[in-house]
Image: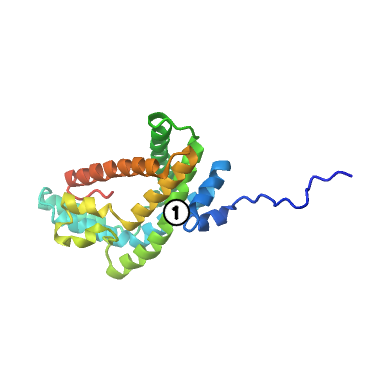
Amino acid sequence: METSLIPGLPEEKSVGGFSKILNIFFEPRKVFESLKTKPTWLVPFIILVLISVVSMYLTYPFIMADTIEKIRTNEKIPDEQKEMIVSRMEENTQPPWWQVTLAPVGVLIYFLIVSGILFFVGNVLLGGDSSFRKVFSVYIYSSLVAIPAAIIKIPLAVAKKTAEVQTSLALFLSPDIKEAFIYRFFAHFDIFNIWMIILVSLGLAVMYNFTVKKSFTTVFALWLLWAIVSSSLAGLFGGLMRF
C-alpha cells in the first residue's frame, strides 16, 4: 500500500499570518522569504488601519491645538480670517466622521502609490523581476513598524498634550525653529523611519535577488528625495501642512 508521507523527511512549514507579524521585528528575512513564496497583506493592513484610527482619535485634540497655534502665529493670514478659521476649528473636538470612514481607503491608496513607485524602480530602472503583489506585501509588512512607534509616541503625545512628539534628529535642534526647513528635514530622520527603510530594503533584496547594499541605496535615495521635497512643500504652506 502506497503512502504520500515519507518517513524521515522534515515537513516544510510556512510562516503563518500572525507569526509573520511578530517575526517582522525579529526575523524579517524569514518573513520576506515566506512572502516571496506566498505574498499576503490583508491582516497587517487591517492592523495598520486600526492603528491609524486609534491614533487619530487620541491625538486629534492635540493636532487641532497645534494647528490653531500655527494659524494664530501665521502673519500671512489676516486677523479677521484667523478668528473665523479658529472658531470653526474649536467646534470640532473629534475627528470628522468622513475622515474616520475614509481612513482605510486613504491608507490603501498611500500604500498602493508607494508600492507602485518601488515596483517601477525595481522592475524598470534596476532591471529586476518581481510582481507588484510581492512588493506591496513587503511595504505593508515593513509598515508594521507603526506598532512600536504608536506604543511610544501616542502615550508621549497624550502626556505632553501635543502632537509634536519627536524621536528624530530634530531633538537636537531648538523647538523655536520648528518651522524652518532644517528642522522639518531633520524630523524625517526618525528612528522608526530608518527602521522601516532597512526593512523595505531587505524585503526588496529578497524579492528581486538584489544585494542588500543595492536595495538600501535605492530605497534610501528615494526616501531622501521625498524628505527634501516634503520639507520644502511644508514651508510653502506656512507649516500648516503635515507630512
Asked whether 196 or 149 is in front, the reply is 196
The residue indicated by pointer 1 is 144
Rendered location of residue 243, percent (x, y)? 28, 48
User: Is 153 located above or below residue 207 in the figure?
Assistant: below
Rendered location of residue 208, percent (x, y)? 47, 37
User: Is 123 located above or below residue 6 in the figure?
Assistant: above
Q: How many marks?
A: 1
Q: Quadrant of residue 66?
A: bottom left
Q: Neighbour class for label 1 at 10 Å: few (<14), some, many (≥20)?
A: many
Q: Residue sitting at 24 percent across and 48 percent down?
A: 241
Q: Residue sitting at 86 percent across and 43 percent down?
A: 2
Rendered location of residue 174, percent (x, y)? 16, 61
Q: Can you see residue 162?
A: yes
Q: Residue furthest bottom?
A: 159
Image quadrant in which the N terminus is located: top right
Q: Can you see residue 93?
A: no
Q: Residue furthest front?
A: 8
Q: Residue sitting at 47 percent across and 40 percent down?
A: 135
Q: Secondary structure at mark 1?
A: helix
Rendered location of residue 126, percent (x, y)? 39, 32
Colour logic: rainbow
Asked whether 153 or 197 is in front, the reply is 197
The amino acid type of the residue labelled 1 equals Leu
Asked whether 146 or 192 is in front, the reply is 192
